[in-house]
Image (cartoon, rainbow, N blue to C red):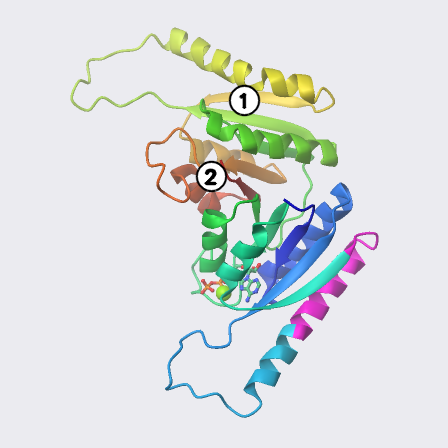
Amino acid sequence: MSALIIAGTDGSIGATAAVGWAADDAARTGLPLRIVTAVHRRPNDISRFPVLDGEEDAMTRGAREVLDEAEATARTRQPTAEVSTTLAEGPPSLVLRDLARDAAEIVIGSRGLGGFAGAVIGSVSMHVAGHAHCPVVVVQPGQVPAYGEITVGVDDSDACEPALAYAFEQARHRECTLRALYAWQLPVHVFAPEIAYDMDEVRIAQYAAMADRLASWRQKYPEVSLIEDVRCAHPVEALAEASKEGDLLIVGSHGRGTLGSLLLGSVGRGVLHHAHCAVAVVRS
Ligand SMILES: Nc1ncnc2c1ncn2[C@@H]1O[C@H](COP(=O)(O)OP(=O)(O)OP(=O)(O)O)[C@@H](O)[C@H]1O
Ligand SMILES: [Mg+2]
């Protein structure tokens, strides 16, 4: 992994928000920022769309303008950040995914220039969040960091450890409070509804599981103010609720769920659709 933050831009409002977020993180962490635009010249690969005279030049010029504008946005926002730009060739989701292989994190907008009006998240964002090896931050336009608190979703599996590592580093750089949220639910026994649990016992066990998981992190980051938040609720609902009053929501790409073959667990997919602030998906 190289110490580099990548931001993808197509010149949209969502991408501009991503560039701003990435510039702030570059200034916080001291890592250099590289802004990338991918030009996909023949998205349909169909001969019915012949190459028009000057089309190639016009696309390159347009992409260069998008990059220049994004670079100016980043430099104005964070004059001390080290900023560079790259014009890459190919499908944006593949270009960004490949570049992410060597990055500390990749930052993209929740939406871009395309898509349909009601979509919450675009296909490039979804693809990168599901495939990239490094943490993927998906930023929503119009969000102003104001709460001095970030949230990390925790479950009782080791899969959340990389998310915890990212979350503690973010909290340290931001000098903000970290809320570690563990939402648990009782299993539903459709065929044996008479099975009853001792709820006090279950609650005590859940609190103990959370305390165990956080013990070594507390020791490693004594300077981070940590809130242990254990709730009996659906994780997506609880995390989305916490994101209303947080600057960043961090989740692992997978959790305890059994469908390990999916690229993104149901909680990751759920919070990308329902969070009220930027979401970081950290590969397990
Ligand atoms: N050509 C590109 N080059 C670099 N980054 C891009 C490019 N296209 C999209 N992105 C990044 O991905 C983010 C989300 O855009 P995405 O394309 O997924 O959404 P959309 O355009 O609304 O929908 P879709 O393209 O799926 O119809 C953008 O904000 C930007 O950060
Ligand atoms: Mg798009």
Q: Considering only vertical position in the picture, is 169 above or below 36? A: above
Q: Does the magenta stretch mainly form a helix, a strand or a loop?
A: helix
Whether the magenta-drawn stretch holds residue 265 is answered as: no
* Quarter of image, res 55: bottom right
Residue 243 in the image: state x and y as whole percent: 55, 38
Q: Which residue is mark 2?
A: 253
Q: What's the magenta region? A: 64-82
Mark 2 or 1 closer to N-term? 1
Report whether residue 244 is seen. Answer: no
Residue at x 51%, y 68% (from the top left corner):
90
Q: Is residue 197 left or right of residue 118?
A: left
Report whether residue 88 is seen. Answer: yes
Q: Is residue 50 left or right of residue 151?
A: left
Residue at x 36%, y 31% (from the top left corner):
257
Residue at x 37%, y 86% (from the top left corner):
48
Instruction: Determine which of the numbered discs, if any, sits on residue 229 in the image.
Output: 1
Q: Considering only vertical position in the picture, is 239 above or below 11? A: above
Check if mark 2's residue and mark 1's residue have beta carbons within 8 Å: no
